[in-house]
Each structure stands twice: as structure tokens, then as C-alpha cells.
Image: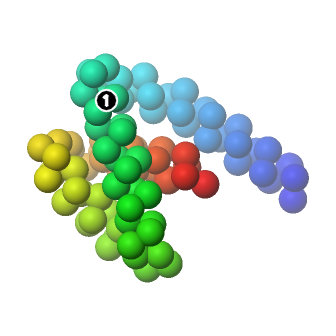
Amino acid sequence: MEWLEMAGAVLVLMAGAVALPWLWARVGAEKLKTVWKWTCVSVQAAEQIFGSETGERKKAYVREFLRGKGLRLDEKTLEALLEAAVRELT
């Protein structure tokens, strides 16, 4: 089981190495910092509020939270940020 965990960690690092530069170029440095902060906050809040409920309800909560902060993101960017924030949480 340890090799699976190590392989998972390597994959997460590789995904981060690809995703972060892509996001950086797409969104911009300052906006990315702000978006990242609010994405992490909203993902943690969704986990607390909805617990073991489905991911779709949690995603909808995060989308609405970010919209409430005036942050509008395309689906691909939002999905990448959500995945990274969830990984950070675990």
C-alpha cells in the first residue's frame, strides 16, 4: 500500500507542476492568489457544511461563494482550482 501512496504523491506533484504555471499564465499572479485563498476557504466551508454529501452540491456551493466574491472563472480553471484545494485539504 505504501507504493500506491508514494505513486499518488508523485502524481499530485506532477499535476501541480503542470497546473500551477498554466493557471498562473491564465489568471495572473495577483488574481490567482486571491482566487486561491477564497477557493480554499470555500472548499473547507463546503466540507464542514455538507460533510459526506456528494461533490456536486459542494461544487455548487464553491461556485456561488466565489461568485459572491466577484470572482468569475471558466469551468476548466475552476475545476483545476477545486481539485488542487481538495488535495491540499487532505
The location of residue 10, given as percent across then percent down, is 70, 38
The structure residue drawn at horizontal position 26% and vertical position 66%, both measured from the top left corner, is: 60
The location of residue 2, given as percent across then percent down, is 87, 52
Q: Residue furthest right?
A: 2
The structure residue drawn at horizontal position 55% and vertical position 46%, both measured from the top left corner, is: 88
- In the rendered image, which residue does mark 1 sit on? 32
Query: Camera-side residue: 85 or 11?
Result: 85
Query: Camera-side residue: 78 or 46?
Result: 46
Q: Residues within 10 Å of mark 1 (few under 14, many from 20)?
A: some
The location of residue 29, given as percent across then percent down, is 31, 20
The location of residue 35, given as percent across then percent down, is 29, 37
Query: Camera-side residue: 80 or 51?
Result: 51
Q: Quadrant of the N terminus?
A: bottom right
Q: Is residue 72 visible?
A: no
By what rule are the colours in the image chosen?
rainbow
Q: Quadrant of the C terminus?
A: bottom right
Q: Secondary structure at mark 1?
A: helix
As displayed, is residue 1 above or below residue 79?
below
The structure residue drawn at horizontal position 76% and vertical position 45%, both measured from the top left corner, is: 7
Q: Check disc 1 and give the amino acid type.
A: Leu
Number of numbered discs present? 1
